Image (cartoon, rainbow, N blue to C red):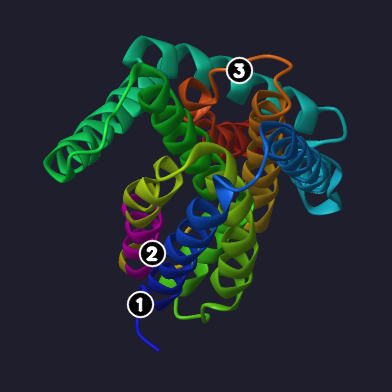
Amino acid sequence: MFPGFGTLVNATTVLLGALVGTLVGHRLPERTRTVVTDGLGLVTLLIAGTSAAAVGDEVLSDAVGGAAPMLIVLGSVLVGGIVGSLLRLEDRIEALGGVLQRAAVRRVARSGAPADAAARERFVQGFVVSSLVFCVGPLTILGSINEGLGNGADQLLLKSALDGFASIAFAASFGWGVGASVVSLVAIQGGLTALGAGLGSFVPDPHLAALTATGGLLLVGVALRLLDVKQVKVADLLPALVVAPLLTALVVALR
């Protein structure tokens, strides 16, 4: 195995899943595609809940005190949301999806097939939602860093299997925007793997617990989008994943 192997496998499974989902998606009625997306939203909510439960980990409570973990997650989301909204991260991710979609449209145009505004919206939505689902979860962060530390790619291989099935369901509803999300996946997971390889074991267990709990909370926002409850701007909240371990370090230092 080599650093980045897990990310390579992950990207391959997403592309294969997107291919399968795209091929069968047009054969499924709209009602079926909606039910599949709702089901995926519910599963995402389940995963988010189990991750967010890390806010109650004893290792975190012992390090920062009994009441502090919830405040750390709250502060991380608030500060991260302010930073992300000022940086317009959601808009930038959507713009990247638009760029990739236009490239796909040009390819379609050369083949003589029509492309419309509805198809563009579907592509961008698929890219944004898939990028968030595949890149926000704790397995993305912990698995990538662990692989960089030389601890193997087991977590990323597990994530690859989950993402492969998820991409089939997504692509059946959103089309090739799901396949384009491998750009985000490779950039984020590859960067985290390089970070782990370069800096070594730099994140203590309490800080990882805070990060995992915050990541789980962001996944709740993704689930709400999939369930069409509220279009939470989850990308604007992504800086919270950086703020969480920093706040934990601050509380530990002051305690």
Neighbours of disc 1 within 10 Å: few (<14), some (14-19), many (20+): many
Amino acid type, residue under disc 2 in the picture: Thr
Amino acid type, residue under disc 3 in the picture: Val
Circle 2 sits on which residue?
A: 193
Amino acid type, residue under disc 1 in the picture: Pro
Determine the secondary structure under disc 2. helix
Query: Would residue 70 be counted in the magenta stretch?
Result: no
Which is more N-terminal, label 1 or label 3? 1
**Does residue 100 appear in the picture of this structure?**
yes
Q: Label 1 near label 2: C-beta < 8 Å? A: yes
| Image x and y of residue 8, in percent | 38, 71
Tell me if 61 is positioned left or right of 129 in this view: right
Q: Label 3 near label 2: C-beta < 8 Å? A: no
Q: Is residue 239 above or below residue 19?
A: above
> In this figure, what is the number of numbered marks?
3
Tell me if 151 is positioned left or right of 48 in this view: left
Q: Is residue 63 above or below residue 218?
A: below
Task: Give the Cα distance between marks 3 and 1.
Answer: 34 Å
Which is more N-terminal, label 3 or label 2? 2
Neighbours of disc 3 within 10 Å: few (<14), some (14-19), many (20+): some
Q: Main secondary structure of the magenta part?
A: helix
Instruction: Identify the residue shown where x is 70% and y is 49%.
Output: 209
| Image x and y of residue 38, in percent | 76, 35
Circle 3 sits on which residue?
A: 232
Task: Give the Cα distance between marks 2 and 1.
Answer: 7 Å
Circle 1 sits on which residue?
A: 3
Query: Would residue 194 be counted in the magenta stretch?
Result: yes
Q: Please provide the residue range marked out in magenta.
A: 187-197
| Image x and y of residue 212, in percent | 67, 46
Quadrant location of the C terminus in the rendered image: top right
Question: Which one is nearer the viewer's eye here, 144 or 79?
Answer: 144
